[in-house]
Image: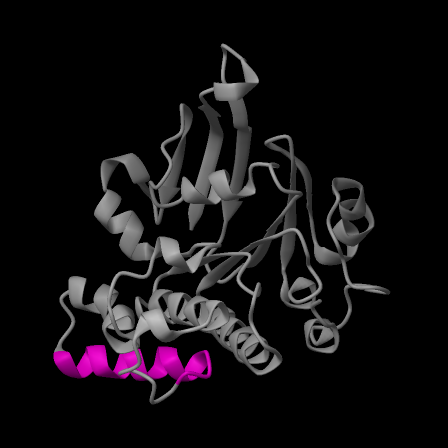
Amino acid sequence: MIGVEGVTRRFDGGATGNAGGVVAVDDVTLSIPDGEFLIVAGANGSGKTTLVRTFNGLVTPDSGTVTVNGTPVRDDLVAARSAVGMVFQDPRDQLVAATVGADVAFGPENLGCSHAEIDRRVDDALAAVNMADREDERIASLSGGERERVAIAGALAMEPDHLVLDEPFTGLDEPARRSVLDRLRDLRAAGTSVIVVTHDLRDVLGLADRVVGLSAGRVAVDDAPRGAAAELPGLDVRVPAGFDGRSADAADTSSSP
């Protein structure tokens, strides 16, 4: 479980001239049970990326506490980052190796996995994003969408307890999008909590157990998909046309621009 209790995070006011700083996350409290598929939704600047980055210590709250599997993140960053996999919105922020295979293997290697286990994880993760047998390709030669798929594969290869994906479908073609959605569905069924950060819910609302909507750093919506769908447009969030929360396959029939 991920627990967030009274978390607030401010940033330097900078060009805004705000001497007190800009409040990105404002007194947020929520819990994410194991196996839950959670959407964190909101417009750009609503605080959703800052919030999820507190889950593994990439951002340190000014006040409040974040726990992962019962342990405060600030007390054990290594454990938090092993348990919470993160896929950034811009894959350039997390790709670290020259080739596809080496990049996906980086996390399992740092966990001390055996060579056989690393190979299995790399193969499974690349298959999940439709990039099987492309281990030897150089990262520099890939398109933006392909780099995003490698970043997702790198997080999947860690086999974390909780997987956070920040706008994961940007730049993905239709086969890759469907493959990733299928993999997220499988992860939830296996007990991994999946947290998708987005302002466009058309791909994922049909898979979600719960939606948390942020506005100005505060929780404005916390509801099951059917209830949340009525409120989210007021937060400048896109929901699937005609969504009624009843079909788990709604995500498969929607389309991304």
* Residue that appears at 58% across and 83% down: 175
Q: Which is nearer the eye, 24 or 206? A: 24
Q: Position of residue 91 (x, y in %)?
A: 41, 59
| Colour theme | one colour
Magenta range: 115-131
Lateral position of residue 230 relative to residue 76, left or right:
right
Residue lying at the far right in this picture: please name it.
242
Q: Name the side, left or right, on which 80 lies relative to 205.
A: left
Q: Which residue shows up at 29% across the image and 71% down it?
A: 104
Residue in front for this viewpoint, 83 or 70: 83
Dominant SS in magenta: helix
Q: Toward the viewer: 139 or 219?
A: 139
Residue 240: x %, y % from top left: 78, 63
Examine the structure image and report whether residue 247 is included in the region drawn in magenta: no
Residue extending furthest front?
141
Question: Height in image: 120 above or below 84?
Answer: below
| Image label count | 0
Residue appearing at x 44%, y 80% in the figure? 128
The location of residue 13, given as percent across then percent down, is 50, 19
Q: Is residue 21 above or below residue 52?
A: above
The stretch drawn in magenta includes residue 120: yes
- The percent coordinates of residue 110 (x first, y second) are 17, 62
Q: Quadrant of the C terminus?
A: bottom right
Residue 92, located in which quarter of the rendered image? Answer: bottom left
